[in-house]
Image (cartoon, grey):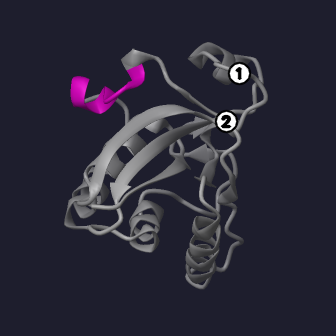
Amino acid sequence: MKQRQIVLAGGCFWGTEKFLSLIPGVIETEAGYANGKTENPTYEEVCYEGTGHAEAVKVLYDEDAVALSRLLQIFFESIDPTVLDRQGNDTGSQYRTGIYFTENGDEQTARNELSALQQKYDKKIVVELIKLENYTKAEEYHQKYLDKHPFGYCHIGRQTMEKAKKG
């Protein structure tokens, strides 16, 4: 098994974390805050104090079971990549979409997948692609939120969630 890590932002991290956790080959997911201008932000600071963080999900995956390119293709099913700072009913820069890489080779893989994705849309793709500069684990009550609250709010529909399980 070859473990790798990527951080993905797809709107509210409750649904994104659940969605990504269903993909075969994903070992672990964790809700958190990525690429903001403060250290160790709280949820309230991210939402109301303009820290610049994105609600994001740290994904640990087995590259032998799911390649990064495939992981990204599945992730793209859960977002509208043409909308800036919004997914579903959630609006604000913390709900932007993004791919935050830690290994240089992952940047080119992501660029290739974003380029292929652009071919499917007339509107411009606005998914952020930058190196992970910082990441803070979100508060415990955000972790596995939809497992704890199965009928909680989620911007990702049930049919899309089911697609994730197929890989």
Task: List x then y, in percent, for residue 161.
Answer: 28, 53
Task: List x then y, in percent, for residue 21.
Answer: 30, 47
Q: Residue at x 45, y 33 (%)?
A: 31
Circle 2 is placed at which residue position?
134
Judged from the image, the secondary structure of the residue bearing numbered disc 1 is loop
Do we see residue 155 in this rendering? Answer: no
Image disc number at residue 91: none
Q: Residue at x 28, y 60 (%)?
A: 164
Quadrant of residue 105 within the rendered picture: bottom right
Judged from the image, the secondary structure of the residue bearing numbered disc 2 is loop
Circle 1 is placed at which residue position?
39
Q: Quadrant of the C terminus?
A: bottom left
Q: Which comes sooner in the sequence, label 1 or label 2?
A: 1
Q: Which residues are magenta?
A: 142-150
Would you say the residues marked 1 and 2 are in contact, meaning their CB atoms lie under 8 Å apart?
A: yes
Quadrant of residue 74 within the rendered picture: bottom left
Reply yes or no: does residue 2 show up in magenta.
Answer: no
Task: List x then y, in percent, for residue 9.
Answer: 55, 47
Q: Residue at x 39, y 17 (%)?
A: 140
Within 10 Å of the Cα at label 2, are there few (<14), some (14-19), or many (20+) other Cα atoms?
Answer: some
Amino acid residing under circle 2: Asn
